[in-house]
Amino acid sequence: MTEEDISNGTEAKIVKSEEQKRKEHNERIIRTGIASIMGIIAGALSFLLVHNETQGVIGFLLLLGAMVFQKHIFMLIKLDISGLGGKDWFYQSFMAFSFWFISWTILLTIQ
């Protein structure tokens, strides 16, 4: 092996590593976008379906449904979810909760 072969092999590994990092980054962006959209949809549905304070639990149940439904969307668009741990699912759920809360609150204040 010459120095040129070694340097080319190292560069190929670096490029592959960069491509892998870019792919993982794109998947994280897609997962965050899905969580955000699901939260907004759950917030809008909560606004449309909850008509008084006693039915507020329905809005929360819609949020929980949106959190569970995310996993199925990930599988439909063929994202690899096998590597997601508890911290990742907590992040996904928190993003959905945040957008649910913000969108429902905004819709309630402009009513």
Image (spheres, helix red, strand yellow):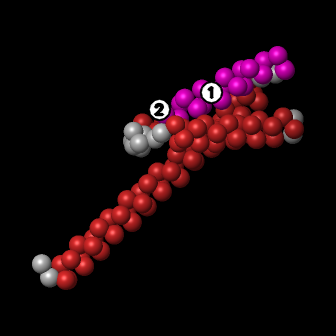
Neighbour class for label 2 at 10 Å: few (<14), some, many (≥20)?
few
Q: Nearer the viewer, mark 1 or mark 2?
A: 1
* Alpha carbons under labels 1 and 2: distance apart: 13 Å
Q: Is residue 69 magenta?
A: yes
Per the image, the residue denoted by label 1 is 64
Label 2's element? helix
Q: Image quarter for residue 99?
A: top right
Q: Image quarter for residue 56?
A: top right
Q: Quadrant of the C terminus?
A: top right
Q: Is residue 85 magenta?
A: no
Residue at image coords 46%, 51%: 27
Residue bounds of the magenta highlight: 52-72
Q: Looking at the picture, which amino acid does disc 1 mark?
A: Leu
Instruction: Point out residue 76 in the picture as x, y percentages from the top left corner.
Output: 42, 37
Residue 83 appears in the picture as rendered: yes
User: What label does residue 72 carry, if any?
Assistant: 2
**Above or below for 85 versus 61:** below
> What is the chief secondary structure element of the magenta stretch?
helix
Residue at image coords 81%, 21%: 51
Residue at image coords 87%, 38%: 109
N-terminal of the two: label 1 or label 2?
A: 1
User: What label does residue 109 carry, if any?
Assistant: none
Neighbour class for label 1 at 10 Å: few (<14), some, many (≥20)?
some
